Image (spheres, rainbow, N blue to C red):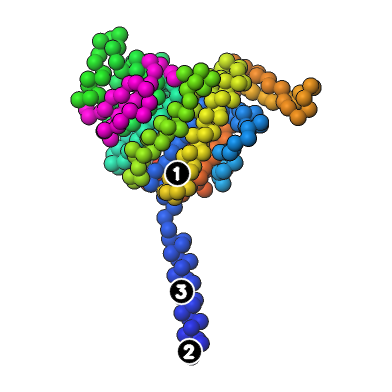
Amino acid sequence: MRNNNLVVSIVCFCFLVTATIQAKPKHPKRVVLMIGDGMGLTQISGALSNFNGQNAFARFPVIGFSQTASADNYVTDSGAGATAFAIGKKAKNGAIGVDEFDQAQIGLFELIKKAKGKTAVVATSSITHATPASFYAHVASRNSEYDIAKYLIHGNCDIAIGGGSKFIYNRPDGFALDSVLISKGFQLIADTFMHEVRSNQFIYTLAPDGLKTMKAGRGNFLTQAAALAMKQIGNSATSLIMIEGSQIDWGGHANDFDYMQAELLDFNAAINFVLDEAMKDKETLVIVTADHETGGLSLLKSSNHPQKFEVNYASKGHSGVMVPVFAYGPGAEHFSGIYENTNIFHKIKTCLRLK
Ligand code: MG
Ligand code: ZN
């Protein structure tokens, strides 16, 4: 009898342990969505080919592919590309946070604010550029950066760090956006980096438009800005931080491999930082992807150096190839497979239990 009781107890104990492990919810408290603008597989493989540091992309357990076509073109631009992530709908090229009929749609940032969560964008472009703008603004054209900046007033983006001071201060239309934002509770900072932050909501601009390139000495801005955004948001439930390596795309448009590589290595460093944080807190879902590939980059056989490749660009614009998606953390398993870029919206929505 005693032995039987022992067996029953052990079985019950094992069942309880198993049940406890299985019942642990796989929902992240916060999502960090990292977008390498114009970052296809060839950019990643080329840029990291002779890199001796830690390859951040190799640290992800889950990998998928995103199909990037926009509502009106097989080859997307960054507006429609980021809009797909932000609102879950295909938009026309050039559109920001609107559907294919240019109608404003409720996006992840609005859903998160409704759930009392926190939101942030970090970019090496202006904070009003197509990729970050798609998360908090709703306009038919990405070129309306002065109008895009006004959407910050709505308060759906708690933290914005990047360039773009000219769209906030001393605007040509005379609109005192800076005063209005301050009256709404935002702290505005526009100077060198790592100024003291006093408010939960702040707009931090470090250049009139895009930030300088890595080659021109941008330093570790992106990692520092990612750290600041993550620290300010903390692990308050239901938050989303979008971090963009904006200029990987600009190197692609210029068909300048060295430019692209320096920007991608900077992005790689920021990913390593975010992953280290996520591995510590275990409540952060990290997603790294791209809106599209830029330049039709291929790495061809080199006749002079058999161990190296020859860089070949097919275009000064974007291409329609699928882009990789890397995921780590609670909910990462949702991101394997091949799916439309709009599904990244739905997957984040599910992971954060947004309604
Ligand atoms: Mg961009
Ligand atoms: Zn581009």
The verdict on residue 287 being magenta is no
Q: Which residue is mark 1?
A: 277
Q: What amino acid type should be assigned to the residue bearing mark 2?
A: Arg
Q: Secondary structure at mark 3?
A: helix
Residue at image x 59%, y 25%? Answer: 261
Residue at 61 percent across and 17 percent down: it is: 255
**Badge 2: few (under 14), some or many (20 or more) residues near its Cα, within 10 Å?**
few
x and y, in percent, of residue 21 in the image: 46, 62
Question: Which mark identifies residue 2?
Answer: 2
Can you say whether 343 is above or below 179 in the image?
below
As for residue 200 lying within the magenta part, the answer is yes
Q: Which residues are magenta?
A: 184-211
Q: Nearer the viewer, residue 107 or 145?
A: 145
**Mark 2 or 1: the one toward you:** 1
Instruction: Decide: few, some or many residues near mark 3? Use Cα within 10 Å; few <14, some 14-19, many ≥20.
Output: few
Residue position for label 3: 13
Residue type at mark 1: give it.
Glu
- Disc on the earlier residue, 2 or 1: 2
Name the residue located 40 percent from the left edge and 24 percent from the top edge: 162
Left or right: residue 24 versus residue 340 is left
Q: Earlier in the sequence, mark 1 or mark 3?
A: 3
Q: Are marks 2 and 3 in contact (CB under 8 Å)?
A: no
At mark 1, the secondary structure is helix
Comparing labels 1 and 3, the label whose residue is closer to the camera:
1
The x, y position of residue 173, in whole percent, is: 28, 9
Q: Find the distance from the CA under tag 1 to the CA under tag 3.
A: 34 Å
Q: CA distance from mark 2 to mark 3?
A: 16 Å
Residue lying at the far left in this picture: please name it. 183
Question: Residue 235 location in percent, x, y?
Answer: 36, 45
Query: In terms of secondary structure, what is the magenta stretch mainly?
Result: loop
For label 3, being within 8 Å of ligand 1 is answered no
Q: Quadrant of the C terminus?
A: top left
